[in-house]
Image (tube, rainbow, N blue to C red):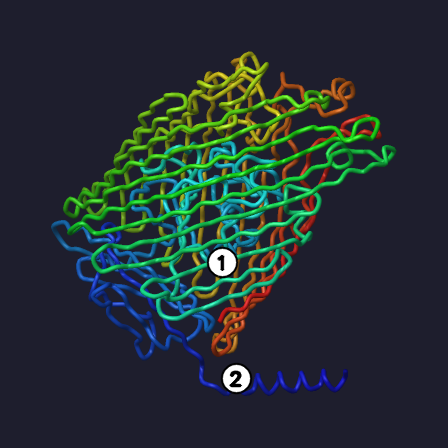
Amino acid sequence: MKSIFTGIVIWSLLTSISFAQQSVPTQTVMGTVVDAVTQEPLPGANVVIADSDPLIGTSTDSQGKFQLAKVPLGRHDVKITFLGYQPAIKSAVLVTTGNQTVLNIELHEQVFSSGEVVVTPELEKDKPLNDMAFASSRSFTVEETRRYAGGLDDPGRMATAFAGVTSAGGVQDNALVIRGNTPKSVQWRLEGVEISNPNHFAGLSVAGGGGLTLFSGQVVSNSDFMTGAFPAQYGNALSGVFDINFRSGNPIEREHAAQIGVNGLEIASEGPFNEATYLFNYRYSTLSLLMPLLPTEGGIRYQDLSFKLDLQTENAGRFEFWGLGGLDGQEMMPNRDKEEWEYEAWDRIRSEMNLGVGAVGLSHRILLGEGTYLNSTLAGTVNDTYLDQNRLDEQVELQPNLRIDNRSGSLVAGSYLNHQFGRQHVNRTGLKVHHLFYDLQVQVAPNDEPPLVAYSKGNGSSQLIEAYTQSRFSISPSLTMHGGIHIQWFTLTDELTVEPRAGLEWNLTGKSGISLGYGLHSQMEDLRIYFVRSQNELQNRSLQFAKAHHFVLGYNRSLGENSRLKVELFGQELYDVPVIPDSSYSMLNFVQQWDFNESLVNSGVGQNYGVELTLERFLGDGYYYLFTGTLYNSRYKGGDGQWRNTRFDQGFAANALFGREFMLNDGRNVLGVNTRFSYLGGERHSPVDHVESQAREEVVYDQENAFSQQFDNRFIVDLTITYRINRPGHSSVWALQVKNLLLEKDPSFDYNLKKNSVDLIQEGSPLPLLSYKIEF
């Protein structure tokens, strides 16, 4: 054994010496350059590696493509220029040996006015990819989902570092609270199509959230995140939108990646495929080390698959075939020793659960002439939730307790026409039809006494039809106006809404600007709410959309090449909110309640208002930081007409993120150290009615004083350390991501069967996610 170990050490030293004697390895950087508005390729654009000596540069070909060979490893700024367009800089681009670097670059046409024109490079890393977005919007990179400590490669968890965003469900769930709104009001989109909640164990404890995202960093491209007053293109969302894109595979070489970690196995591959490119990623796990993170107990398993095929033709346009799917399973077993029963959910319940979610689509984009393109999509989505839950009675016999058998989905067909009327006016007009199909059944044993009774039941189909038009007017180089209308019609309730959107961007000095945004937004409820039954009669069949006026005033200032300061004031006036008559109940506080079977009316209102601060330095010279702070108030009026704080009125949230990258051994090795500190107001809760709780042997809350109390403030620390090793032909990455480093607890109430009283439960533990990935 000793001789074997000695041999390994000697071999490792010889390999290291041999590698050190080699010349510094290089890699290829390639990509395309297109017009940001029309998506037309820009032939002849100049692409250079800034500050390279000797200069590394090239020009794009007739299809807007470029290729830079022998680029040294490490971080580089890539500068792109083209006559008549504003120059752009892609900064801190990481070049490694494992994969070629592929960039997709969009240039904005320069709007000229009389007098001297000063052209400066465009370096707005947070600027949304959607040119129609005008307020409360930013883009993010897939690299940030890993680099941001606490992100865990999850766009949802990463977004909680942004101003105005907190989480619901503590460290166990990735559900998002945006400006005091319930997590179910966030919309997820993939390649422009609204999809079901894209998380493993989606919606089990928090509607709109889950334990882990289905999105893998191997396939996600730069994407947009919006927190208010979004453009007319986006409908059926009340608080925020995640607009996710998949990247295309490498068009030149086949590349692969494999990763193993405590959260499972992952493999990915990409490259040319006949005249197209392919990209896919698959993950599988049965490991139990994720249990502190997931909103479930018991044995778990999950898997997911993502893919994209991209075919670019010379005359017929661009075709993209993409998909995303996930399967989850879990079983819980009860304790049959009655004397040891302590908590209902963990000791008396046996359950079997299977969940599935997926989306697949075909997108097509074609240029119809100068300044005009048509984008069309045909897609399908599906969501399947099955839960069979039984409960041990006093005779230690299993009795049916809850059965969920919900299948829903949609067929989506939509197109939009993007046209540029000269340099000052761009318009996007579209139509989208969602054919919704559903077979829903939720059965509950009232008061835990069988038989099961249908609390929600419905099957059939209906349609959600959306139409919109949005224009952007570049009045001058410093002033841009936005205006649009979104219309949606839900055939199930026969409701039609007309929602105006408007915005203004005013560049004051070249380094600072003001933005104004307004939008009227609406959202339908989860389909099972419309089919709630009481005494076998439908209660909410004619329920209308909840609606909200969004108002945003923002100030943005550049503090140098890589830094910026942003302040936003926001206000939201919500109305037509579903509430229970003569009750404090409002859907603005909805988390998850499978046994819900109450009649709702659209008489509730709400208010969210506050101020957000962002101080950010993007990655450059090996480091970055992000400070965000939010002060806000969230109130609602239920069916009894009284104003109260909402469940999600935490009052404040503050985040501080720091990161440092160390380039070692001429860029062959890269060490990244990232930390995050979060200080948050506690989630609100209703007082416990101890007398009624003892009588019913379950937690009963005082609804007359709903959400009048608050848990303690929370301080959460996260850490991410990565170490990349570049070798000829491949790279390997070690990553340690520690969530909740200081053991912050998630508080909740549960009824203790032994003590015959309500306990305050404090759960939570650090979760170290260790992984190893090889790229080749």
- Residue at horizontal 28 percent and vertical 41 percent from the top: 415
Residue 47: x %, y % from top left = 28, 68
* Mark 2 residue type: Phe
Q: Residues within 10 Å of mark 1 (few under 14, many from 20)?
A: many
Mark 2 = which residue?
A: 19
Query: In which quadrant of the rendered view does residue 416 lie?
Result: top left
* Mark 1 residue type: Asn
Q: Are marks 1 and 2 in contact (CB under 8 Å)?
A: no
Residue furthest to the right: 339
Of tags 1 and 2, the one toward the viewer is 1
Identify the mark nearer the N-term, 1 or 2: 2
- Residue at horizontal 52 percent and vertical 84 percent from the top: 19
Q: Nearer the viewer, residue 296 or 628?
A: 296
For the N terminus, which image quadrant? bottom right
Please tell me how many numbered marks the rendered image carries.
2
Residue 271: x %, y % from top left = 40, 66
Q: Secondary structure at mark 1?
A: strand
Q: Nearer the viewer, residue 328 or 194?
A: 328
Q: Is residue 101 left or right of residue 704?
A: left
Residue 648: x %, y % from top left = 55, 31
Residue 647: x %, y % from top left = 57, 28
Residue 694 is marked as none
Q: Nearer the viewer, residue 660 or 100?
A: 100
Q: Secondary structure at mark 2?
A: helix
Residue 281 is marked as 1
Q: Residues within 10 Å of mark 2 (few under 14, many from 20)?
A: some
